[in-house]
Image (spheres, rainbow, N blue to C red):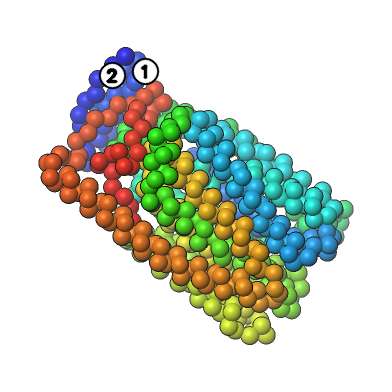
Amino acid sequence: MSHPTRKHTHDSSMQPAVEEKGDVLEVAATYTPEEERQVLRKIDCAVLPLMCLVFFMQYLDKQSLSYASVFGLLTDLNLTSTQYSWCSSIFYVGQLVAEYPFIYLMSKLPLTKFVGATVILWGIVCMCLAAPKNFASFAAVRFLLGFTEGAVSPAFVTITSIWYQKSEHATRTGLWVTMNGLAQVIGCFLMYGIGKNTSLSLDPWRTLFIVCGALTGASGVAFFVLMPNGPNDAWFLNAREKEVLSMRMARDREGGDKTSFSVRQLREALLDVKTWFVFAFGVLVTMQSPVLTFASLVINTIGYDRYQTMLYTAPSGAVQVLLLWIGIIGCWFFPRNRTHVVLALIIPPLVGNVLLLKISLDAGWGMIAASWLASCITAVMSPLLSLTASNVKGNTKRSVVSAVFFIGYCAGCIASPQLWTEKPRYFKGVVTALVTWCTLFIVVIAYWLICKRDNAKRDAVRMETGVDEMVHDVVLDKNGAPITDLTDKEDPRFRYSW
């Protein structure tokens, strides 16, 4: 069955809308800037809060190990420093194992339903962390927890690229990554409150895992029920607004979420040098991540009790949020220079690690402030995730590249805790953090140069051929997404963000 197409131009007052023709939606009318703003507001009020809720719970569950270590986990399970490091690492072994099947499943199944189901399972597993009596059983449950959380972060990169245009990625990614810092603050106060409650029959750290797991399961149910798969499933939009959303994303050359797996796109992703830059981002930005898990132990071992440790650890989340939003504002002011913003954001945690290495252990507040600065990892991760969302096109390729980032992320998180075993200075871990921050600085510069080179080549080809970049055919399928599923390399009008 053939489907006719119609050519349109991207004029600010002449935006394409859609009409249904059999199994295909075809470009036919216009929409106004006011309609576009209304649609964007509704997406921000319906889609973004659900993403923020789930990401908040993911980070709270991750950080719960750090809080539990101060409130009896180490002594109750008789954990050595090496075993505690493995409790951190094995979580990411589970995530890493999950990435391989999840690459395929995220391309074949309705993405939001799949993610919602995994969130519910992860909540159940989190509650099971309250049961173990020894290292082996606790480590096994931590592995399962990592496995069930494996879909969330790569799926969120994809979901962001489905609902938002490239110019909006940095801000929206920043919003859901902000939940990391917020979870750090609230998690410390939650552990403090549970620890102070002497009427509980369970140990405080066991109670924490049950509470976090129950909240996670509830958020998973909400995500499964309320998060739509695409424009036509958007319960918060009327028919006209769904049309506007479909063509708005078509204008941004975004292919939407399609339940198909392309071997051709898999091959292209693996042979694309930018994919391996993304892998390097994942490894290098997380080789310093143990400072988040071990920061409370650092504070606890320099002379503060467990309640003071929670209170003094909490502000590190606020510092992370502050630096993250400095980065987001930087992306607003310099929308075409996100890599430059990343380079600037590397400096504060680099300074924090230098201070952890050099200042005296007796400098109480100095060590605390240094741990806050060294913990500012999410501020760097947010624009890197937004670049990943912006610079990959094609359903399968996007899933593969997102998974490659998080494979690198898991690899860094598996290896790095093994270097944080020597209290209280953790010399090997801090030195590794310094080296990887410097390496990331160089890698980001190289990525920036490659994206500029590729865009220049595409501009040169367009000038030689005389093809008008703004003219194109758009045909939408019955789900409200462009029927073609071109990759960024196949689409000559696509431009890389840097």
Q: Are discs 2 and 1 less than 8 Å apart at CB? A: yes
Q: Is residue 39 visible?
A: no
Residue 179: give x, y in percent of width and height: 55, 54
Is 401 left or right of 393, judged from the image as shown?
right
Residue 388: give x, y in percent of width and height: 42, 50
- Between 64 and 401, the residue placed more toward the observer is 401
Residue 364 higher or lower than 462, as above or below: below
Residue 37: give x, y in percent of width and height: 34, 42
Of callouts 2 and 1, which one flags the residue occurring earlier in the amino acid sequence? 2
Amino acid at circle 2: His
Write down the quadrant of residue 181 in the picture. Answer: bottom right
Task: Name the quarter where the C terminus is drawn.
Answer: bottom left
Is 433 left or right of 423, judged from the image as shown?
left
Q: Which residue is mark 2?
A: 3
Task: Name the quarter where the N terminus is drawn.
Answer: top left
- Between 15 and 166, the residue placed more toward the observer is 166
Amino acid at circle 1: Asp
Q: Residue at x 79, y 52 (%)?
A: 136
- Between 387 and 105, the residue placed more toward the observer is 105
Give the crowd class for mark 2: few <14, some 14-19, many >=20 residues within 10 Å.
few
Residue 297: give x, y in percent of width and height: 70, 69
Q: Residue at x 65, y 47 (%)?
A: 94
Element type at mark 2: loop
Q: Residue at x 25, y 51 (%)?
A: 455
Q: Which residue is mark 1?
A: 23
Give the crowd class for mark 1: few <14, some 14-19, many >=20 residues within 10 Å.
few
Whole-number angstrom distance, CA of label 2 to CA of label 1:
9 Å
